[in-house]
């Protein structure tokens, strides 16, 4: 068994890992970026504190724009800033930032290829106690269908910090998805991160688990449990939803013959949909989608909700094992 | 830095008439497009491109140019024609509006023509972008280098996003931002005050922290005076309510909302038969409403 050694040395032991949210990583990342790149401007709509944009605001008040509770205007303002050569980072909650704003995003960012970065916290069931109104579980579907967009979903605090910096010079608009909850930081400063390039976390021959965002770590732990049952699962961290790393996914399809997609998102039209669109045309293999089954979430802790929806280590392990044993015959 | 043409009022009146005639030809060739609002704004576009706006024909993206944002993208035909006359778009495209492969999209697209400044069409989105541009000018220390003009329709004042932007402009006291509303009182389904009343528009903008002026959008000396006054006010954003006549210059189109979204040849036929509409419109424009003998 091979696995990526550039992870936190304690990565198999969640109790020993520090717990931090990816929104914290993004807040820190944009602060560091702001020190190097004077074109970076931070925009927010009354969520500077909870999205961690306040770190940047404190150090660079001249490059911080507070627009109040008015998300549509924020997209237009960001477009205006980008037309003038600045690089706006818009810190917002996912459901308001893109759910309310899809058409302005389409017209003002995607169509003219404006370099705006939407840094969206509170995505997925990981939003937790706020409940279904705030748990954005349809964002991959909304954003990956837009031409010219890059869509990124970091796996933890460290990766979020890297991603915020890595997208600064990309040519078009970017959607970056973050989580509110604290969860184990299993990567470290040295773990590679390249936009559009899948990171293999663990090798395997029997099947491949393709995971993204806040469930990657659970998928990795589940894969080690599967190993104990003599099921060899490759694990891929697919942090870039668009452009999809088609090479790594088709390679996995050819080599392991079975793909599982795990995401804190509706099973429909998310990463699972993207993978299905790819392999069904080029190398059809059996697929299993683990995600949200066409329903809304509810209030609860992230861990409780992941248990309820089968997105914790146990749930992923059980579902993959049952599926594998069923289709192997 | 002056306007490259700096026309006199007499020259502007002549230019606006030429723009109207070419606009009719453009819309007829396209077979679809918005007549009423385009004709109504011909004088204001002539005033901007041939007197008020600072820009360079040979360098349309000159960093210190005034920015002219068209929020209600559907009246782009009149902007295209004005830009063709000003030398910012090649003349060969005059009859290429809405044609496959043409840069003159049915609603304006920035990546096809950068001098348009933005892509637009969905209503209520221009003012936010103008606010963003004005904030960028402040951040970059360019606030005194140029003005940002945002042309809007009156109908799109019904969009919530417009008021979010108005609030932000008031908060940041954006002194180099000048909004202009084409107050022609019509929208596609009828008269604005019947579809969704906008008045008191002046008081609303004042309450949002703007200085508000009004002008006759067909009187060049008033247009120039009010825009110059707006430029002189630096303490807050300025809105100019431009009172215009939709369809201005073509008698059978004037003030009729039925002409909002159709070209000559497709409009209501109770006054002029469809097949005669373009011909009659051009004749009226050439002869200033029949006041002079037609030469041709």
Image (tube, grey):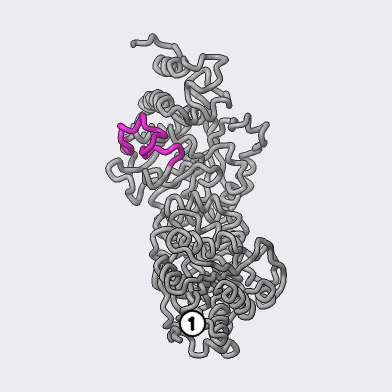
Question: Among all residues in the image, which is located at the extreme front?
Answer: A329
User: Whole-percent x and y of residue B281?
Assistant: 45, 18
Few, some or many residues within 10 Å of mark 1 (<14, 14–19, 20+)? many
| Image height of B97 relative to B207, above or below | above
Q: Residue at 40% across / 26% down in the picture?
A: B29
B91 drawn magenta:
yes
User: Whole-percent x and y of residue B251?
Assistant: 51, 18
Question: Among all residues in the image, which is located at the extreme right?
Answer: A299
Q: Residue at 59% across / 78% down in the picture?
A: A321
Residues in magenta, as a range: B87-108
Q: Residue at 46% across / 14% down in the picture?
A: B276
Residue B158 shown left or right of residue A250 in the figure? right
- Could you say which is closer to the camera, residue A267 or residue B263? A267
| Image height of A37 relative to B294, above or below | below
| Image height of A136 relative to B158, above or below | below
| Image height of B290 relative to A110, above or below | above
User: Whole-percent x and y of residue A260?
Assistant: 54, 71
Q: Chain of mark 1?
A: A
Residue B256 shown left or right of residue A163 in the figure? right
B229 drawn magenta:
no
- Could you say which is closer to the camera, residue B171 or residue A168? A168
Q: Tell me if I can see residue A180 in this picture.
A: yes
Q: Label the magenta part by its dominant secondary structure.
A: loop
Q: Residue at 60% across / 69% down in the picture?
A: A290
Q: Tell me if I can see residue A89 in this picture.
A: no
Q: Tag count in the figure? A: 1
| Quarter holding residue B193 | top right
Secondary element under disc 1, as helix, strand or loop, is loop
Question: Among all residues in the image, which is located at the extreme left?
Answer: B58
Q: Which residue is mark 1?
A: A187
């Amino acid at each position: 068994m091979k696995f990526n050694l550039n992870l936190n040395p304690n990565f198999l032991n969640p109790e020993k890992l520090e717990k931090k949210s990816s929104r914290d990583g993004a807040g820190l990342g944009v602060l560091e970026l702001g020190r190097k790149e004077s074109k970076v401007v931070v925009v927010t709509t009354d969520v500077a504190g909870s999205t961690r944009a306040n770190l940047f605001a404190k150090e660079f008040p001249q490059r911080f724009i507070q627009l109040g509770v008015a998300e549509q205007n924020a997209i237009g303002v960001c477009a205006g800033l980008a037309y003038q050569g600045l690089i706006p980072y818009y810190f917002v909650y996912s459901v308001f930032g893109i759910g309310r704003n899809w058409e302005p995003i389409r017209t003002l960012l995607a169509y003219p290829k404006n370099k705006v970065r939407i840094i969206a916290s509170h995505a997925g069931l990981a939003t937790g106690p706020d409940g279904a109104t705030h748990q954005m579980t349809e964002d991959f579907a909304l954003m990956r269908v837009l031409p010219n967009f890059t869509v990124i979903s970091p796996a933890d605090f460290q990766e979020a910090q890297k991603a915020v910096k890595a997208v600064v010079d990309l040519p078009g608009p970017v959607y970056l998805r973050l989580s509110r909850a604290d969860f184990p930081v299993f990567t470290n400063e040295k773990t590679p991160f390249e936009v559009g390039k899948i990171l293999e976390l663990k090798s395997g021959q029997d099947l491949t688990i393709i995971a993204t965002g806040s469930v990657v770590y659970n998928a990795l732990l589940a894969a080690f449990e599967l190993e104990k049952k003599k099921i060899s699962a490759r694990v891929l961290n697919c942090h870039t939803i668009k452009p999809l790393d088609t090479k790594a996914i088709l390679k996995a399809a050819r080599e392991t013959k079975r793909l599982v997609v795990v995401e804190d998102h509706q099973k429909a039209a998310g990463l699972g949909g993207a993978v299905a669109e790819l392999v069904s045309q080029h190398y059809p293999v059996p697929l299993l989608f683990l995600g949200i089954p066409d329903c809304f979430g509810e209030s609860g802790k992230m861990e409780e909700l992941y248990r309820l929806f089968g997105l914790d280590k146990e749930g992923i392990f059980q579902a993959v094992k049952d599926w594998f044993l069923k289709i192997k015959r | 830095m002056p306007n490259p043409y700096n026309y006199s009022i007499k020259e502007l009146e002549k230019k606006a008439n030429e723009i109207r005639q070419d606009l009719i030809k453009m819309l007829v060739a396209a077979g679809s497009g918005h007549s009423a609002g385009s004709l109504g704004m011909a004088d204001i576009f002539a005033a901007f491109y041939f007197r008020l706006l600072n820009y360079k024909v040979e360098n349309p993206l000159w960093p210190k140019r005034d920015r002219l944002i068209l929020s209600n993208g559907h009246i782009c035909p009149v902007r295209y024609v004005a830009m063709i006359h000003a030398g910012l778009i090649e003349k060969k495209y005059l009859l290429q509006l809405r044609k496959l492969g043409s840069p003159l999209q049915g609603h304006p697209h920035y990546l096809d023509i950068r001098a348009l400044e933005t892509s637009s069409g969905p209503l209520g989105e221009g003012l936010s972008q103008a606010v963003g541009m004005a904030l960028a000018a402040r951040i970059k220390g360019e606030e005194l280098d140029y003005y940002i003009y945002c042309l809007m329709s009156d109908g799109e004042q019904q969009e919530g996003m417009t008021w979010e932007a108005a609030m932000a402009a008031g908060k940041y006291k954006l002194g180099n931002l000048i909004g202009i509303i084409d107050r022609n009182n019509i929208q596609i389904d009828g008269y604005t005050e019947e579809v969704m009343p906008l008045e008191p528009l002046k008081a609303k903008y004042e309450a949002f922290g703007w200085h508000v002026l009004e002008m006759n959008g067909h009187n060049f000396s008033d247009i120039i005076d009010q825009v110059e006054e707006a430029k002189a006010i630096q303490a807050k954003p300025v809105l100019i309510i431009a009172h215009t006549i939709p369809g201005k210059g073509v008698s059978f189109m004037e003030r009729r909302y039925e002409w909002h979204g159709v070209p000559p040849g497709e409009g209501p036929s109770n006054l002029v038969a469809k097949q005669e509409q373009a011909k009659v419109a051009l004749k009226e424009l050439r002869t200033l409403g029949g006041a002079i003998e037609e030469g041709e």
